[in-house]
Image (tube, rainbow, N blue to C red):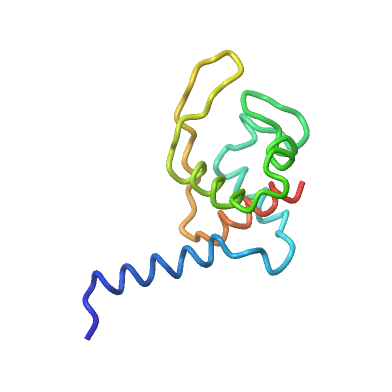
Amino acid sequence: MRSHASVSIAAAVAACFVILAPAAQAADADSAQALARQNNCFRCHGVEKAKDGPAWKEVAAKYKGKPEAAARLFTHLTTGEKAKFADGHEEEHKIIKSPDPAKTKNLIDWILSL
């Protein structure tokens, strides 16, 4: 019989594989944008134009060809780490709220596809 700790560890490892695995198919842009709207991401980010935060096309260009890109963005969007602004101040990045890590991964895949 498995303990609760080993089941939790196994579930966490499985979730990591879902999150960090290469995209098997193209990102669902409509779903990604819906999650971004629900989390008010467009307040600070534009697809093509920088606002308080960088344009997502700039983010995609920054991470193009980097194998750690999806994992790095997942950490940034789910932990509330500090975001640095052009004027030098820092704020905690808003944490994406989604009960399904696959939806967050889809958002990241969409951003990186731009």
- Where does the N terminus fall, quadrant-wise? bottom left
For the residue pair 75 and 36, the one nearer the viewer reads as 75
The answer to whether 42 appears left or right of 81 in the picture is right
Q: Residue at coordinates 61% horizontally, 44% vertically from top-left?
A: 36
Q: Residue at coordinates 46% horizontally, 58% vertically from top-left?
A: 99
The number of discs equals 0
The answer to whether 105 appears left or right of 65 in the picture is left
For the residue pair 61 and 37, the one nearer the viewer reads as 61
The answer to whether 84 appears left or right of 63 in the picture is left
Q: Position of residue 14 (x, y in %)?
A: 45, 70
Q: Residue at coordinates 59% horizontally, 65% vertically from top-left?
A: 21
Q: Position of residue 62 (x, y in %)?
A: 69, 38
The answer to whether 17 appears left or right of 67 in the picture is left
Q: Position of residue 29 (x, y in %)?
A: 73, 54
For the residue pair 13 and 50, the one nearer the viewer reads as 13
13 above or below 88? below
Q: Residue at coordinates 49% horizontally, 46% vertically from top-left?
A: 75
- Extreme residue toward the front, this view: 66
Q: Position of residue 54 (x, y in %)?
A: 66, 30
- Extreme residue toward the bottom, this view: 1
